[in-house]
Amino acid sequence: MVRFPRYLCWILLLATLAGCAATTKPPGTQPAEAGNEPAARMDDRRFQALLLQAEDTRQMNDAVAAGLRSEDANRRWLAVRTAGRLGDRSLLGAFDDADARVRAEAVFGAGIAGMTEALPSIVERMGDSAVNVRASVALALGQLASPEALLHLLDMLGDADTDVRVAACYSIAMIDGADVAVPRLIELISDADEAVSGAATYALSRLSGRQSALSLPKRLAARGELVLLAEHPSPRIRTLLAEGLYKPLPGLQADTLANLMRDSDERQVLQAIIRATSFPGAPTFVIHEVTILHRDEHVVLATLRGLARMRGALTNQLLVDFIINDHRNWLQAEAIRALAEADGRTAVQVANGLSIDTDPVILAATAESLYGREETQAGEYAHRLFKSTHPWVRFHTIPAMACAAEPLTALFDDMYPTTTIEEKIQIARAAGYRLGMSDRSEDDYADALTLLSRLWGNGLDGDALALQLAVLDASANGNRPGGAEALRRGLQAPDPGIRRHAANLLTAHDDEDVEIPEIPARPLSYYENIVEWSETRHAAVVTMFRPGFDPGAFTVALDSARSPMTAWAFAQLANRGFYNLRRIEEFVPGLRLHAGRGGEDHYTATSSRTETVVSTFPPGTLAAVAAGPDEWLGEWMITLESRPNYLGRYWPFGRVAQFFPGVVGNILPIDRVVSVQVYEGTGMEALDPAN
């Protein structure tokens, strides 16, 4: 494993950065002024603030309308961007704007908003003289993802510009029923332009690996071309080959992956092979027997999480043997969780012995393996774990207590007065598991709903949005009538993100559209502060720590020009110490890492709007991960590989500027975010390991 860079004076460095970190004005206390002043009379900062206010409230205002009519091209671009984020049809009038940047933003906004009625107008811009407009057309067609859009994308594969052809390949990769594209993509794999060749390989890999994307004959044709790339010198291409052979057929496809595993030692290639062979219900491959013993812990981790998706006696035995014989407790814990996902009954049987272990990491994972189980033995083992004096074990056992025989209110009554917000979130999860059980009495369900009602009040009193979200998610479990009533409380929550989340859950619960109550605007000064802050470039130093290693740091450059609200919110949370001591909550091998909740009792006081921007998500993209549509509570991720398919699913607001391979590329779930320090700069400032 690559060791983190050594920082002998890293604490002093961070203290220095904290001292020079950008400060921001507090939100104003005066009500916002009406936005009916003509755009020409507004100063730029106030104009941009009114646009942010419109985005934050999801309501068009006069500033947006005035901006669309402005003689200033930059104002028109900003207004079109806002209209696109709001999904407002007023942006369609900008398709013929004299400024190419405005046209490109309008086309992209219509696509990302799913405006199918705009397809003819988008197609008309295929012949636009500006490359950026044509590239936006290609991306927009991929978002609309219709058969007609696919045919136009095929035409765009012949565009004179590389960027347009690459964008067309990426968009074709997102469309189902793309048989007609396979022959042309096969041709482009041999294109002289490496960017186009790589994009075509990516598209063929994505289509080949998705059941709904191609018919069987075309999938076989695509895979026949992919196997020819097994000896390609680029690890990225071999990774795409492996991903494209997801669920390999016996014979050439399976043999290609086996040979690739034998001949390759690149982490990303091996991880892709594991993903390709670890599909739901699959039996254990010889590949897994080899990679579970690999010297690279990232490969071992990928194997364990792959086995979690699989089934069968050999899968269970491989995981049990690993739990018994491996001596890295965090990987043993991953194996316990994997066994619970692969075969819950076997996990309950194994939990009998594991629940008397002395290692809190093993005990906590054992508790997690009991989540949602209904066996009598599961309740017995949960009680055993709940008696632990170790706070980490007891904390993780709380949701497992749903399988106990007693009412939940009685189980948690003694601990409730002193519970932290994070423990209350665990209690909410326990109530959710109880509501999802099939053999409980109506009294038990009513008891769980009573507990959730109490927790909802705690979440409102403490402005704990994470607790409010946990209560809403738990209330939706089991589709109980009382759960719908609990969800309706969320429609009146003070935070707009919570309201939207409640409405989405109610829509899924009752299969009917739910109107979200009007969202009040914050003071205009709040948005003016964001605009003023975003006028200066900002970056952040993220310091990581792993037990037994020296701390390592990497820098990220924040994109406050395109994502001012998201970058601002990130900076505010960082400067408050919100990310301090957070753990890497989820690591999907080779794809992304998440910085999630840690053990500290601090949460955001409000959710933030996410901001959609044009991006093909190259490696090192820093993006927001929302808890639901537009409900960002501070969680972020960084792509480890290029992932164009993330467009519309995540929200970029920066990029890694320094130390991507050594630190970011080697992060494991046992690592902690020591701190995130935001400062004025580009992210390229010297961080000399020797100083």
Image (tube, grey):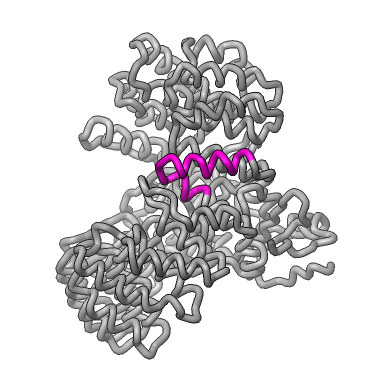
Write down the quadrant of residue 255 in the picture: bottom left
Nearest the camera: 137 or 33? 137
Q: Residue at x 33, y 61 (%)?
A: 250
Q: Residue at x 61, y 18 (%)?
A: 384
Q: Is residue 307 magenta?
A: yes
Residue 422 location in percent, x, y? 58, 30
Nearest the camera: 224 or 139? 224
Which quadrant of the figure contains the N terminus? bottom right
Main SS category, magenta section: helix
In the displayed structure, 198 sits above or below 313; it is: below
Q: In this view of the protein, can residue 599 be seen by the observer?
A: yes
Q: Residue at x 51, y 26 (%)?
A: 349
Which quadrant of the figure contains the C terminus? bottom right
Nearest the camera: 479 or 257? 257
Left or right: 418 as drawn, with respect to 530? right
Q: Is residue 527 magenta?
A: no
Residue 61 location in percent, x, y? 32, 53
In the displayed structure, 596 sits above or below 267; it is: above
Q: Residue at x 67, y 48 (%)?
A: 672
Q: In this view of the protein, can residue 559 be seen by the observer?
A: no
Give, as a single range, the part of the protein colored magenta.
304-324
Left or right: 64 as drawn, with respect to 663? left
Residue 362 location in percent, x, y? 64, 34
In the displayed structure, 339 sits above or below 140; it is: above
